[in-house]
């Protein structure tokens, strides 16, 4: 499946919770929503077992997402192949979940400012 790269498009609204279903993007490896007007919270459903199971790069930088990173995003079954997670220049608040405590062991780079 080719990358789903929607950055710099006029994407607006909230992140769809339905994208967290197993059937939504079974072969997706790259999700790029950076530099869009996507807003609202990060859906907990995106961390459901089987959701985004092949995603290696997820870039949500320079968006209007807000709230905190759901703790379930650091579960061992969430994003099993994720290597890069970009969350720079968002309106996220709160502390980071325990990505470093043995969870998401493959994650090599987390960008969060």
Image (cartoon, rainbow, N blue to C red):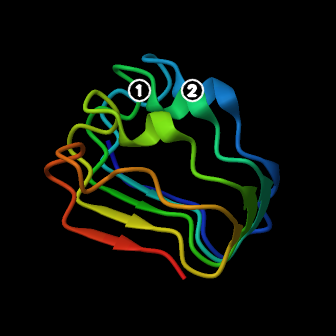
The quadrant in which residue 52 appears is top left
The quadrant in which residue 100 appears is bottom left
Q: Residue at x 64, y 61 (%)?
A: 94
Q: Residue at x 37, y 42 (%)?
A: 74
Q: Which residue is mark 2?
A: 45
Dot 1 alpha-carbon crowd within 10 angstroms: few under 14, some 14 to 19, many 20 or more: many
The quadrant in which residue 26 appears is top left
Residue 18 x/y as whole percent: 64, 24
Residue 77 x/y as whole percent: 28, 27
Dot 2 alpha-carbon crowd within 10 angstroms: few under 14, some 14 to 19, many 20 or more: some
Q: Nearer the viewer, residue 25 or 99?
A: 99
Whether pointer 1 and pointer 2 mark residues with C-beta atoms closer than 8 Å, the reply is yes
Q: Where's the C terminus, which quadrant?
A: bottom right
Residue 83 x/y as whole percent: 23, 59
Residue 42 x/y as whole percent: 65, 46
> Whole-Å distance between the Cαs marked 1 and 2?
8 Å
């Amino acid at each position: 499946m080719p990358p789903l790269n929607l950055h710099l498009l006029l994407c607006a609204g909230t992140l769809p919770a339905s994208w967290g279903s197993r059937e939504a993007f079974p072969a997706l490896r790259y999700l790029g929503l950076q530099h869009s007007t996507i807003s609202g919270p990060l859906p907990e459903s995106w961390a459901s077992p089987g959701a985004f199971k092949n995603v290696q790069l997820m870039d949500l930088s320079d968006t209007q997402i807000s709230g905190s990173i759901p703790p379930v995003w650091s579960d061992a079954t969430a994003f099993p192949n994720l290597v890069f997670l970009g969350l720079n220049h968002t309106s996220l608040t709160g502390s980071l979940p325990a990505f470093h405590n043995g969870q998401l062991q493959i994650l090599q780079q987390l960008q969060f400012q």
